[in-house]
Amino acid sequence: MLGGGSVGSLKTSTALIDGSVEYDNSNMHTIMFRKTLAEHSEAIRISREWFAETGATLAENVPIDNGTGTPNFNGNSHIWRWPWGSTFQFAYCATDDDVYAHQTQSYTCVLWDESTRTASEFMVRYLLTRLRTTDDSLFVRCRLGTNPGGPYADWQMKLFLGGVCPHCEPPVRIPGQIYNDAVWPSDDRSLKGMTTQFIFSRVTDHNLLGEKYIRNVRMQHAATAEALLAGCWRAFEGQYYDIWQPSTMVVSRASIQNKWYWEHWVGADYGFSGSKAVAYLFARDPDTRKIYVLDEHVGVHEPVRDFARSVYERFAKKHEDQDQPRKLRLMYLSPDAWNDRGDQHTLAGQMNEVLIPHGLVFVKAQNDRAGGAMLTYELLRDGTILVADNCKLLAPAIESAEHDPAQPEAILNIPNDPRSDARDAFRYGIYSYHREAMKPLEVRVEERVKSQWPTDPTAAMFNANKIMEEEKAKTKPQFYSRRGSAARREIQAWERSRRG
């Protein structure tokens, strides 16, 4: 079950009650996770008021121990123990590997506090294997509680909410209803008989905190206040792209009528183990100046040369439905691909060995995290960037981006999160590209002829040569300074304009 919604809706307190309701049963063993033990401070404060009244004692910074087996010295926790053997412990899980400290343990209830900021899909799935008991009177369960937003919000939205926000979109999975047909988002595997349920909690469900608390929340930034009070999963605390509007910023690929002469370029970020290899195809419309993200390639455990080959095949190679190949000018790759690994074969070098025979190479992308993030923010806000709907990873990557606490103007990087790889490839492509796109000469001439003499072919023929020379002049280098009689005439004209 996922309990998610506004701040002040007592999610942590509810989890503590849920996880300890069977404290009088010696076989109850509950564990509650956050990213660090220190983050449990508020929950521990609340538990002191309750658990101590029932005869339990607290041991802090001790090995993980469910009370039935050998303590695990590979991880620490804070543990409440009742005299008859039941336990409730506060533990940490900062990375996927931390779950292995629990591989010999057994729990009857697994709790995750602030789950969208703490619990990856892998963590939750693995800890479900520790959810077991020989006591049929106990109800084994997993509970997640959170405010919207965070690096792990995407998979939890898909599993429990059907991928939509129940606050601002028609519900796919109705809050409060129990479902038995959910599948894991990453691979569509069944939950094997386990049920799912979403509880939409709001601060207005009770009056324990008073009107002053709600007033203080309303004073926040508009998107933050909306997220905190209404429990909106599309606008959340810490969201970087708080201007993100999928309804206007994501367009159907079929609606983008890109021409062969549009300037196209690529932004790519390569990852093999844990991370994904991601590349995007960009294009700029020379008429509207809009930038389109046309296509996406996501490689999973894709070797270096195969990645370069895939990018070429998908983005650069002429396909049967194309009259001419795309005008692909530049391909930007993450700067770490040029790192010397000690064998004189950089990742970029290996990729370029594949691309050079096709007349293409990757060049090193600009890696200003803050500048790139702010530029993409401004261009999205102004409607200059539009994302095609076939870029399935990029849209949720943009929506889920958060400010980096250490550098607020930059985006928080989440290791091994494919959405971080997508955001990097997107940023490399936008921030590194500085060329101004100009239509081919013959296209510019044809358009001017048609616009100026649409019904008089004779006039068009006589003036086509003149237009041709004018368009050619636009591409000639312009001298920084003028000399001789031309410069004297310009100075004289400027002086006359001042006197006039």
Image: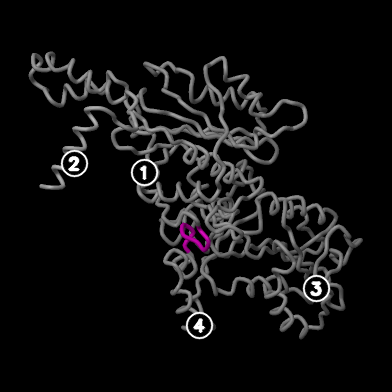
**Numbered marks: total:** 4
Residue wearing tag 3: 25
The residue beneath circle 2 is 494
The quadrant holding residue 389 is top left
For discs 2 and 4, the disc positioned in front in the rendered view: 2
**151 displayed left or right of 63:** left
- In the image, what residue occupies the spot 17% across and 16% down? 464
Magenta highlight: main SS? loop
Disc 2 on helix, strand or loop?
helix
Amino acid on which the number 3 mark rests in the picture:
Asn
Contact, mark 1 vs mark 4 (Cβ under 8 Å): no
Q: Which residue has dot 1 on it?
A: 384
Asked which secondary structure carries label 3, the reply is: loop
Sequence-earlier tag: 2 or 1: 1
Range of the magenta residues? Answer: 232-239
Instruction: Please report whichever mark, 3 or 4, sits nearer to the chain's N-terminal start.
Output: 3
* Residue 381 image position (x, y, % from top left): 38, 51
The answer to whether 126 is drawn above or below residue 110 in the figure is: above
Q: Which numbered disc, 1 or 4, marks the residue that appears first in the sequence? A: 4
Distance from the alpha carbon under mark 2 to that under mark 4: 74 Å
Q: Is residue 313 magenta?
A: no
Residue depicted at 11% across the width and 22% down the height = 453
Residue 418 x, y percent position in the rendering: 60, 43
Q: Which residue is rendered at x = 55% and y = 75% of the image?
A: 8
Q: Is residue 237 magenta?
A: yes
The residue that disc 4 covers is 207
